[in-house]
Amino acid sequence: MSNKNETDLERHVNAPGRDELVKQVRAKIDELGISYVYFQFISVTGRVVGKGIPADHWERTAANGFQLVYGSTANLFVDRQGDYIGYGAESLELVGIPDPETFCQLPWDKRVARVFCTCFRNREEKENPGAHLTSDCRGNLRIIHDQFKDKHGGLHLRLGMEPEMMWLKRGEDGKPDGGFSEPYCYHIDQFESLRPIFMQVMEYARAMGFDMIQGDHEDAPGQLELNWQYDDCLRTCDRLSTYRQICAQVARENNLIACFMTKPFMGVSANGCHANMSLWIGGEDKVNALGNESLPGLEGNFSYLSGGENKFMPEGDDPQIPGQIGLYAIAGVMEHLDALTALGCSTVNSYRRLWDTGYWAPVYKDWGYQNRTTALRISAPGRFEYRAVDSMVNPYLLSAGLLQSFDDGIDRKLDPGKPEPRNIYDAMEAGKEVKKLPMSLGEAVECFKQDDVIREALPDEMAKVFVHYKEDEWARFMATVTQWDIDTYMDCLP
């Protein structure tokens, strides 16, 4: 029975069944010969941060956690004035508590494992000691999703993400030297040229629980998209973070650069990361979905949600129109699209994708069935694709924002209007009035600040850290003299 006087940290450590999971991790450590563990969490920009601790100290760390400066949730970066973003040097240290169900061996060095952590305020804080640290984006998503499920009778978000990224050659100076392959979309020959790379990625991914389902060569130099099975939104976000780690490791082993930057080249497509979503009731975990004989980690890494009722499925005669909950959810996203853009298109460079027209990046606030010219499309009966998102996204923040917009749409029974079947540019030429998304990071952050619903997806300190970080990023860009400035203005007078 829960003690009302327990802190959030104590409730997390004492959660029913956790002691048994901690013991299972010890058994895996002994079985696999693990000697070192990365205890990791996710920063505001989606970076993986944390500490490494010898596996001998697993039980102690599982119970007590480890300490790290609060500013690590903001990458421990400073702003233009030299002040630490989010937290100063005088702040106490957070406590990271491992989530044992995420323990998994690293396939490229089987002596090492990783485990995701939830972050809490220090036990000795004057205010809210041991409370959940609200600048922990991964912890926030779990809380927001649990609240959504409780409020809506078990309705939950299943998510699949489609990260595009580019494999770049590394020049003698160590800097990028063009894409590894030609920019020919879906060409098997170009896909084949990268086979040694993507097969190694897939080998590592499968060893860490990814059910890889398809892949292709996209239409930029060295650009690949590899997809895995959709799942509970938190596990999908964890897998995207892990996928980035896998690609970085494969790049190191092959003297390449794994580039998730949104738009490294003009004149070719950018690195999008479409989010495919559906809301479900019921279902259960399909344990060991990959059929591994021996699991190199706890079974949660190798499990996928299966079954249940998809509440986005059509209810009437038209297979292109989602059910009522789906329509409410779409309307909620449309209502809050400006603020969501700050989460899905989260860097200055993200907006190069939106401005470099002709490459299927969405810039207009509309929706339709299989309509790639709109920001939101029904990609198949039972799911829709949020397209205003790129591969620099922090998926935990975006998922939390989407849940908040769904909640608002369902609560207010919002109407998304009729889906647009036409090319949005043809529709506008015929007289339809459609607004654009925010077209710069500065504009998007201002929209985020004005939207109370989406701000709740980044509660309290998370919103402060995010706004500080992004306003500083925008200010740095606006204050920077670029080569474009030199080329355009150096010889303009007399």
Image (cartoon, rainbow, N blue to C red):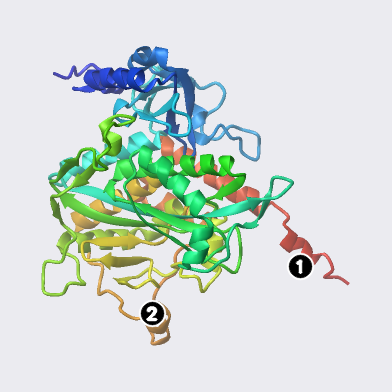
Amino acid type of the residue tagged 2 in the rendering: Asn
Report the front residue among 1 and 22: 22
Q: Of helix, strand and loop, which one carries label 1?
A: helix
As drawn, 383 above or below 125: below
Residue type indicated by callout 1: Thr
Where, quadrant-wise, is the N terminus in this rendering? top left
Near-viewer residue (22 or 275): 22
Identify the residue at the far right of this view. Answer: 494
Residue placed at 44% from the left, 28% from the top? 110
For residue 188, side relative to residue 454 (left or right): right
Q: Name the residue under label 2.
A: 423
Towards the viewer: 388 or 409: 388
Q: In this view, does 437 lie above or below 82?
A: below
Mark 1 lies on residue:
488
Q: Is residue 439 visible?
A: no
Q: Callout 2: 10 Å neighbours few (<14), some, many (20+)? A: some
